[in-house]
């Protein structure tokens, strides 16, 4: 009946937005305690989700780093280290599919490395009549997950005595990190659903306290979306507020943990690189805000549904 | 305006609420729907208002076949039907004028239109000077007038009342009925479900009587119940 012209239509939508926001604000304020309760629920769930995200992020980073360190050592047959053989092997290795980088380690270098590793006990190598260590090529694969297949091919090259890439350790590590990530996604999905229903229940209280108003709106002919929007905005607002609080807690908490852990690892000569707080924070911010807004919107959508069936 | 043909309706539990109901209400009529509680009055109103759908038979309201009305079309049907309930259903935190304006705001009416219509209907129901009062500052009869103003503010062609005088004393009831017949004179079709015998007899209008879900009487100038 009203506002059928295109101009009137746009103006009306803007007016609606103002109405929705006003109603959402009234909803939050009138049910302050309930709103606070929902924000706390969101914070608790997002804390768990966020902590899991951080753990996952670090596992991913560590896996990536270890992947980057994976190399295949091809030990050469004794006496195969003539210039001819070496250059032929080098060419063959570089021509293999999936080889990123090839480094030659001579018998002398190998012995030097061993002495370095032995430190002040290096003297025990002095008694050796001849150098027992083989020369080798260290090969970096392009795709660390293809290490086993590549190592197989290298082992078959003429002049290669044996290959070593820490077979089982590498394979187990990949299986482990895949498992952890899969488990992580399941936990995130599960917690997401749980928090969705917690929010839905809290917003249901807001909706319930306004059921008279909704009933009147229904019978004077308001559309379902017109009724729904304020509640959805209210849900999104609560979700985002929860996400913000969670972000601050996790960001500063992680930062603290990061510096503590880094200092401890430095003292103990460990070199596990955690994801720096700035990078983790950026990931976290995006994840938390999407989750918060999503949980709020869907949760409130669920709770309004029942009251629209009039 | 309203047409029921061979309508059957059962509750979800399966008990029959209405069986084989057929009647027509024409534009501009003033009709009472009478019967004891549980006779099926509310089911008929719910069918007209499309709160529920007939199990079989056809319900037509304002030229629309409600059996085939889509869910998203329901709001637009309701914008053409005013409703008044026994318990007024006003929002306590809004003034009389705000309660009336609310009905227009939520159907996205033009604010200028709202400013023009609200005083008009408040005057129509005789509350021109009480728009700024809150429901708790008004008497029962006045609250029902606010509800009527709200029902009328969008100029509906049909006004449906569910026990409008159920919570009111006889004098106030009569005032409300007088107001309803004035509204009817202005062209609005009025359907009133009631078991207020005194009011029905005194008005002498068309009466549809329900008994156990069946239409047992359709009198053009009826009373609540014929002497047995």
Image (cartoon, rainbow, N blue to C red):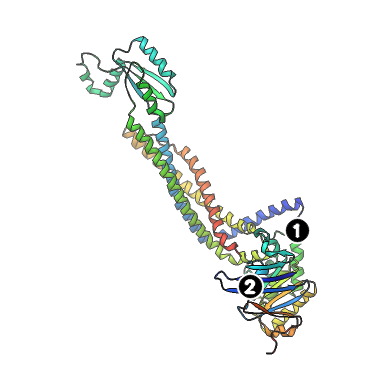
- Label 2 resides on the chain identified as B
Do the residues marked 1 and 2 share a common chain? no
A186 sits left or right of A231 in the view: left
The quarter in which the C terminus of chain B is drawn is: bottom right
Residue nearer the viewer, A75 or B138: A75
Res. A95 image quadrant: top left
Q: Secondary structure at mark 1?
A: loop
Q: Position of residue B31 (x, y in %)?
A: 73, 77
Location of mark 2 (residue) = B43
User: What is the chain letter for disc 1?
Assistant: A
User: In the rendered image of this protein, does residue B199 appear above or below residue A28?
Assistant: below
Query: Is B14 displayed left or right of B80 in the figure?
Result: left
Q: Are marks 1 and 2 in contact (CB under 8 Å)?
A: no
Give the number of the mark in front: 1 or 2.
2
Q: Residue at x 75, y 53 (%)?
A: A8
For label 2, count other residues whose C-alpha is less than 10 Å away and answer few (under 14), some (14-19) or many (20+).
Answer: many
Question: Which residue does the image show at 37% across and 40% down from the upper left?
Answer: A260
Q: Label 1 belongs to which residue?
A: A2
Could you say which quadrant of the image residue A150 lies in?
Answer: top left
Q: Residues within 10 Å of mark 1 (few under 14, many from 20)?
A: few
């Amino acid at each position: 009946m009203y506002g059928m012209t295109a101009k009137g239509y746009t103006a009306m939508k803007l007016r609606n937005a103002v109405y929705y926001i006003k109603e959402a604000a009234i909803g939050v304020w009138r049910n302050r305690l309930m709103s606070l309760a929902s924000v706390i629920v969101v914070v608790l769930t997002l804390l768990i989700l966020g902590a899991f995200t951080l753990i996952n992020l670090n596992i991913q980073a560590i896996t990536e780093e270890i992947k980057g360190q994976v190399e295949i050592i091809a030990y050469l047959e004794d006496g195969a280290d003539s210039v001819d053989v070496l250059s032929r092997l080098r060419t063959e290795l570089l021509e293999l599919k999936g080889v990123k980088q090839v480094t030659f380690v001579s018998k002398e270098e190998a012995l030097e490395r061993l002495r370095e590793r032995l430190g002040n006990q290096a003297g025990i190598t002095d008694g050796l009549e001849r150098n027992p260590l083989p020369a080798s090529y260290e090969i970096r694969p392009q795709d660390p997950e293809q290490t086993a297949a590549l190592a197989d091919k290298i082992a078959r090259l003429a002049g290669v005595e044996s290959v070593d890439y820490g077979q089982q350790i590498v394979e187990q590590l990949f299986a482990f990190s895949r498992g952890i990530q899969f488990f992580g996604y399941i936990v995130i999905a599960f917690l997401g659903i749980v928090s969705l229903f917690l929010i839905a229940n809290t917003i249901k209280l807001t909706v319930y306290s306004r059921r008279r108003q909704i009933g009147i709106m229904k019978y004077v002919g308001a559309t379902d979306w017109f009724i729904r929007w304020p509640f959805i905005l209210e849900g999104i607002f609560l979700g985002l507020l929860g996400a913000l609080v969670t972000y601050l807690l996790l960001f500063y908490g992680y930062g603290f943990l990061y510096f503590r852990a880094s200092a401890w690892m430095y003292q103990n000569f460990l070199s596990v690189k955690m994801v720096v707080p700035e990078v983790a924070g950026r990931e976290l911010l995006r994840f938390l805000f999407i989750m918060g807004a999503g949980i709020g919107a869907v949760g409130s959508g669920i709770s309004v549904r029942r009251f629209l069936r009039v | 305006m309203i047409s029921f043909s061979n309508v059957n309706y059962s509750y979800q539990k399966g008990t029959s609420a209405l069986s084989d109901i057929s009647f027509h209400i024409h534009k501009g009529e003033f009709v009472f729907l009478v019967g004891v509680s549980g006779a099926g009055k509310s089911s008929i109103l719910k069918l007209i208002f499309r709160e529920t759908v007939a199990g079989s038979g056809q319900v037509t309201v304002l030229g629309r076949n409600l059996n085939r009305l889509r869910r998203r079309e329901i709001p637009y049907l309701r914008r053409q039907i005013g409703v008044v309930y026994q318990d007024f259903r006003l929002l306590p935190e809004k003034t009389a004028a705000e309660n009336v304006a609310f009905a227009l705001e939520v159907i996205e009416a033009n604010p200028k239109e709202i400013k023009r219509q609200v005083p008009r209907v408040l005057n129509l129901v005789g509350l021109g000077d009480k728009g700024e009062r809150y429901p708790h500052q008004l008497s029962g009869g006045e609250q029902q007038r606010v509800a009527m103003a709200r029902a009328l503010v969008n100029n509906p062609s049909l006004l449906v009342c569910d026990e409008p005088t159920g919570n009111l004393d006889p004098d106030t009831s009569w005032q409300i009925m007088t107001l309803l017949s004035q509204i009817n004179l202005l062209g609005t079709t009025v359907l009133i479900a009631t078991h207020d015998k005194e009011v029905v007899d005194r008005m002498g209008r068309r009466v549809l009587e329900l008994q156990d879900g069946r239409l047992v009487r359709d009198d053009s100038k009826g009373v609540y119940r014929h002497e047995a």
